[in-house]
Amino acid sequence: MKAILEFDLSNHEDKIHHLRCVQSQQLVSFIHDFGEYLRAEYKYNGELTSIELAMIEKVRENFYSTLGDYNIDLDELT
């Protein structure tokens, strides 16, 4: 099975679609790394106050919930 994507790079909209395709691995890596950063800050940063820890946990929950809302499975993409 093959999939071939074709873009007209002289067309602005097609050029944007092309960039999204060719930079998707970087985007997935960024999303993964950011999630890991939030995890590490929550788990290992001993200098945070309880309020800061609660905020990081809230951001983490929203981060992963939003990924789920968009049907993005990082395990499938990495």
Image (tube, rainbow, N blue to C red):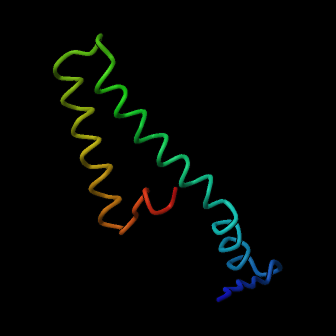
Q: Is residue 75 left or right of residue 18?
A: left
At 30% from the left and 66% from the top, the residue drawn is: 69
Location of residue 2 with respect to 19 vertically, above or below: below
User: On the image, which quarter does residue 45 sit in?
Assistant: top left
Out of 12 and 64, give the one closest to the viewer: 64
Q: Quadrant of the N terminus?
A: bottom right
Q: Is residue 12 left or right of residue 77?
A: right
Residue 51: x and y in percent read: 17, 23
Residue 25: x and y in percent read: 62, 57
Report how many numbered discs are placed on residues in the image. 0
- Farthest residue in the right direction? 10
At 54% from the left and 46% from the top, the residue drawn is: 30
Location of residue 77 with respect to 49 vertically, above or below: below
User: On the image, which quarter does residue 5 sit in?
Assistant: bottom right
At 16% from the left and 19% from the top, the residue drawn is: 50
- Farthest residue in the bottom direction? 1
Residue 16: x and y in percent read: 68, 70
Location of residue 3 with respect to 46 vertically, above or below: below
Q: Is residue 28 left or right of residue 11?
A: left
At 70% from the left and 65% from the top, the residue drawn is: 22
Location of residue 49 with respect to 40 vertically, above or below: above
- Farthest residue in the front direction? 1
Q: Is residue 42 left or right of residue 33?
A: left
